[in-house]
Every structure is written in structure tokens, then in C-alpha cells.
Image: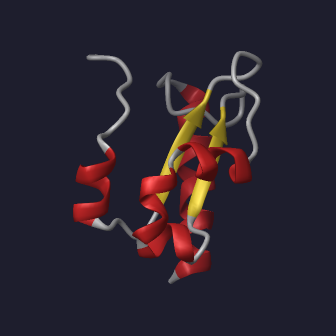
Amino acid sequence: AWGFFTPRDEDTVQRDPEVVLVNIEEPFMNISIEEYKKIRKPLESTKTFREGRVYLVKESREVNLAHFGPSFANTIEWINEILQTIA
């Protein structure tokens, strides 16, 4: 309800998350994972970035983090698949 935000790099580094999901709104922002990592260079020190557990969530009818509704079930399944690969 409050909209999107970009966390401060310092906060992300301090928390050192196991997975990072990055919401990408197509077609407004077409970026690769390599380009994203260059933009967020301070995060290279996190285990998540070193181990390749940063995932771009490209908004679509099937997968999205921006809108709830029937497609949100697909998003949950997609996230679950990601989490199972790192377990």
C-alpha cells in the first residue's frame, strides 16, 4: 500500500539476506542481472551476490510482486521454486 522502495545498500549489507528479489517493471526497465549487479556494486560483499542468489522479477501476467490477485499464486509458486534450489 505504500509503494515500492529501494533499500539502502548499507541496510542490505548489514542484513546479508539469503535471497534478493528485484522487481523489474517491463518494458520500462529492461536490465540484465549483470547490469543490476554493476549498479548495486556496494552489495558485492553480501553472500547473496557472491553466490548468485539475486533474482530479477520481471513483471508479467504470470509473475509479479506489484499486484495481488489470481496471478499472485503463480508468483508464490515461482518464489517457492527459487527457494527450493538454494535449500
Give above or below for 25 relative to 22: above
Q: Residue at x 76, y 44 (%)?
A: 32
Give above or below for 78 relative to 73: below
8 on left or right of 6: left
Q: Residue at x 26, y 52 (%)?
A: 10
From the top left corner, tell me how far across and down residue 60 is, in percent: 72, 28
From the top left corner, tell me how far across and down residue 24 is, in percent: 62, 31
- The outermost residue toward the bottom is 87
From the top left corner, tell me how far across and down residue 27 is, in percent: 77, 18
Q: Residue at x 23, y 51 (%)?
A: 11
Q: Residue at x 54, y 62 (%)?
A: 80
Instruction: Examine the image and state in which quarter residue 73 appears.
Output: top right
Give above or below for 4 relative to 36: above
Count of number-bearing discs: 0
Specify the color scheme: secondary structure
Instruction: Examine the image and state in which quarter residue 81 appears.
Output: bottom right
Instruction: Examine the image and state in which quarter residue 62 appears.
Output: top right
* Depth check, front residue: 22 or 77: 22
* Depth check, front residue: 28 or 14: 14
* Depth check, front residue: 63 or 48: 48
> Which of the image's four quarters has the N terminus?
top left
26 on left or right of 41: right
